């Protein structure tokens, strides 16, 4: 209860546990995305399948963020609290345990109820090789497929990587931005109410993410129609321009909030923070859910359409996209902290860089990603290697 030094063992357990949980989530999402693309490709198109996935993902996110924002896990399960684990720590453990239970339940229900016909060895290429290499064959097939991908698919993957690179500063530091820049809190505060303000800001950020998920779910219903009318390329580019504007707005709000804050005014600031900036921050959270609906559906649908035109499988496509997304996340995770520390400006530098990447990527999408409406753009997208090299 009084020790304030590093807790390396607890940190190791947390990192490994979060890694395993993240692995499970990505495995489940990749399988579902591939399944939705396969089911919708024949009659409705990949955009329909990915939009349905985004809707259900938004519903789950709303429930999850609402549970976190409520912040009373330590009251429901007092056994989660220990002398070294405060209320916020117990809330985090409760949320993670709930996530694990829900994943187990949903996986068991799916395995019991889903009727999927397995292919025999004759229907699977390289069955003898698979028996020889075992589980390594999945990775060998994946990297072999990446090597043989068309230039068109590589362009889709590159644009997807840059798109997620622009998003990850927000996805990783949104609640921290709310706790630091808007609520003027300090996660390491022990002598005053700074830590309480930070925790309150994080919970308010969860409410903002709830609003973000709500707008994401509502927008997902419109994505297929918009893509048919304006083409996927235009929708993808517009979403990135929107991210640029919202990121710029978040940087401006954060700078105004921190510049306008003075410790001498602390008595006039309650734990709820400045109402006007708080409302503006929540509005930005809600608005960014609109382009996020595009992020969770359009790149996947475009990739699925390209692969379908080439006669490839959706599983490899989803795996390739997941890899480039993970690389973008790793890059942001390794660089955002040092950049923020070098400028000593909180999360503003990371958000600013994310906005700049979004602006550049919006232009690249217009230039490099052909329109797939009515198949005309898809035909251009599937040019031969010689055409692209020329």
Image: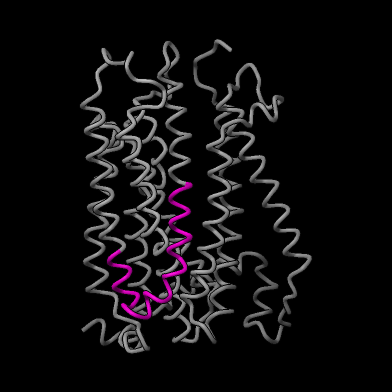
Q: Quadrant of residue 300?
A: bottom left
As displayed, is residue 122 above or below residue 170? Answer: below
As displayed, is residue 122 above or below residue 368? Answer: below
Q: Which residue is drawn at 67% across and 85% down?
A: 123
Residue 81 lies, in percent from the top left, at: 65, 23
Judging depth in this view, the residue of 139 and 157 nearest the camera is 157
**Left or right for 37, reference 110:** left
Q: Residue at x 44, y 58 (%)?
A: 216
Judging depth in this view, the residue of 311 and 29 nearest the camera is 29
Q: In which quarter of the image is residue 31?
A: bottom right
Residue 55 lies, in percent from the top left, at: 52, 63
Q: Give the range drawn in magenta.
A: 210-238
As displayed, is residue 129 above or below residue 25? Answer: below
Q: Is the magenta stretch mostly helix, strand or loop?
A: helix
Q: Residue at x 24, y 81 (%)?
A: 389
Residue 134 lies, in percent from the top left, at: 67, 67
């Amino acid at each position: 209860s009084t020790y304030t030094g590093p807790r390396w063992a607890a940190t190791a357990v947390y990192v490994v546990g979060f890694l395993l949980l993240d692995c499970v989530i990505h495995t489940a999402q990749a399988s579902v995305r591939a399944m939705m693309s396969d089911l919708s490709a024949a009659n409705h198109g990949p955009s329909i399948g990915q939009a349905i996935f985004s809707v259900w993902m938004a519903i789950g996110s709303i429930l999850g963020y609402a549970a976190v924002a409520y912040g009373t896990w330590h009251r429901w399960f007092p056994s989660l609290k220990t002398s070294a684990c405060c209320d916020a720590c117990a809330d985090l453990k409760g949320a993670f345990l709930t996530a694990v239970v829900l994943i187990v339940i949903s996986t068991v229900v799916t395995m019991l109820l889903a009727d999927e016909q397995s292919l025999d060895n004759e229907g699977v290429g390289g069955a003898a090789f698979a028996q020889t290499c075992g589980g390594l064959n999945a990775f060998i097939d994946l990297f072999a497929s990446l090597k043989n991908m068309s230039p068109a698919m590589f362009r889709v993957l590159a644009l997807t990587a840059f798109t997620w690179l622009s998003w990850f500063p927000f996805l990783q530091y949104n609640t921290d931005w709310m706790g630091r820049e808007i609520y003027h809190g300090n996660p390491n505060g022990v002598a005053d109410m700074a830590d309480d303000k930070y925790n309150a800001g994080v919970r308010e950020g969860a409410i903002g993410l709830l609003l973000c998920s709500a707008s994401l779910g509502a927008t997902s219903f419109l994505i297929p129609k918009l893509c048919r009318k304006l083409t996927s390329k235009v929708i993808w580019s517009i979403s990135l321009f929107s991210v640029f504007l919202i990121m710029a707005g978040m940087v401006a709000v954060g700078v105004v909030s921190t510049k306008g804050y003075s410790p001498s005014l602390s008595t006039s600031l309650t734990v709820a923070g400045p109402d006007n900036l708080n409302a503006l921050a929540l509005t930005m959270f809600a608005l960014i859910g609109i382009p996020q609906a595009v992020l969770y559906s359009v790149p996947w649908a475009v990739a699925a359409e390209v692969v379908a035109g080439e006669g490839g499988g959706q599983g490899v496509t989803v795996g390739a996209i997941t890899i480039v997304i993970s690389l973008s996340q790793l890059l942001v995770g390794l660089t955002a902290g040092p950049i923020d520390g070098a400028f000593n400006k909180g999360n503003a530098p990371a958000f600013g860089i994310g906005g700049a990447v979004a602006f550049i990527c919006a232009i690249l999408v217009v230039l490099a990603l052909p329109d797939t409406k009515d198949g005309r753009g898809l035909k251009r997208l599937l040019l031969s290697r010689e055409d692209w090299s020329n």
